[in-house]
Image (cartoon, helix red, strand yellow):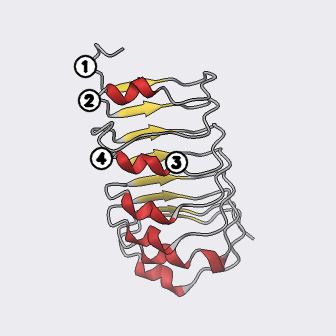
Amino acid sequence: ILNLNSLKEIWFDDNQFSEFPRILTELKNLEAISFFSNNLKEIDIRKEELPNLKYINLCYNDFKIFPTTLKHARQIERVIMWYNEVEEIPDDIYEFINLRELNLENNNLRSVPIELSKLQNLEKLILGQNYFTDQTISTLFEIKSLKELDLGDNEITKISIEIGSLDSLIRLNLSNNQ
């Protein structure tokens, strides 16, 4: 696999991987990785590894903790992690400086750290099917770059007038809340 110097995308969907293959970090031109439907619980990416990675799909795995080592892939733009068991968005999420899309649908999230509002490039935030309430989402109204916000299937009973500050918002999903 190390001879595949031109490789930009690699897909390991529907396998039984329980560990991230470290050999992938040697592929310097890799831009997209998918581990859809595996058994991953963590990913270890160190500084200077995967310098061109822009997209990672970790849906249907066994993550309970958000893989903060992804921040070392400095070009990461899209992190897709629906159907895991992630319980919190880490405080150091602000270090994902190029992040444009974060999809954490159907996890076990209950709150949003204030640091999420520091992501100046974040355009698409999918947080449906979690446990957010109207009290736990106020930080989201500070992410001025948001174009799409999905909070469907949560425990939201009302939306603050502060949502009006999201003047770039094109799509808002609040379906199936309380």
Amino acid type of the residue tagged 1 in the rendering: Asn
Counting residues from the N terminus, which is met first, the one under dot 1 or under dot 4? 1
Q: Which residue bears the numbered disc 1?
A: 5
Of residues 129 and 112, the one drawn nearer to the viewer in this rendering: 112
Rendered image quadrant of residue 4? top left
Q: Are marks 1 and 3 in contact (CB under 8 Å)?
A: no
Q: Quadrant of the N terminus?
A: top left
At 57% from the left and 52% from the top, the residue drawn is 104
Amino acid type of the residue tagged 4 in the rendering: Gln
Q: CA distance from mark 4 to mark 2?
A: 12 Å
Amino acid type of the residue tagged 3 in the rendering: Pro
Q: Which residue bears the numbered disc 4?
A: 75
Counting residues from the N terminus, which is met first, the one under dot 3 or under dot 2? 2
Counting residues from the N terminus, which is met first, the one under dot 4 or under dot 3? 3
The crowd level at tag 4 (other Cα within 10 Å; few <14, some 14-19, many 20+) is some
Mark whose residue sits in front, 3 or 2: 3
Q: Are marks 3 and 2 in contact (CB under 8 Å)?
A: no
The crowd level at tag 1 (other Cα within 10 Å; few <14, some 14-19, many 20+) is few
Residue 133 marker:
none
Farthest residue toward the front? 46
Percent across and percent down for residue 12 are 51, 23
Counting residues from the N terminus, which is met first, the one under dot 4 or under dot 2? 2
Residue 29 marker:
2
Counting residues from the N terminus, which is met first, the one under dot 1 or under dot 3? 1
Q: Which residue bears the numbered disc 3?
A: 67
At 61% from the left and 66% from the top, the residue drawn is 174
Vertical comparison of 59 with 114: above or below: above
Rendered image quadrant of residue 53? top left
Percent across and percent down for residue 176 are 71, 62
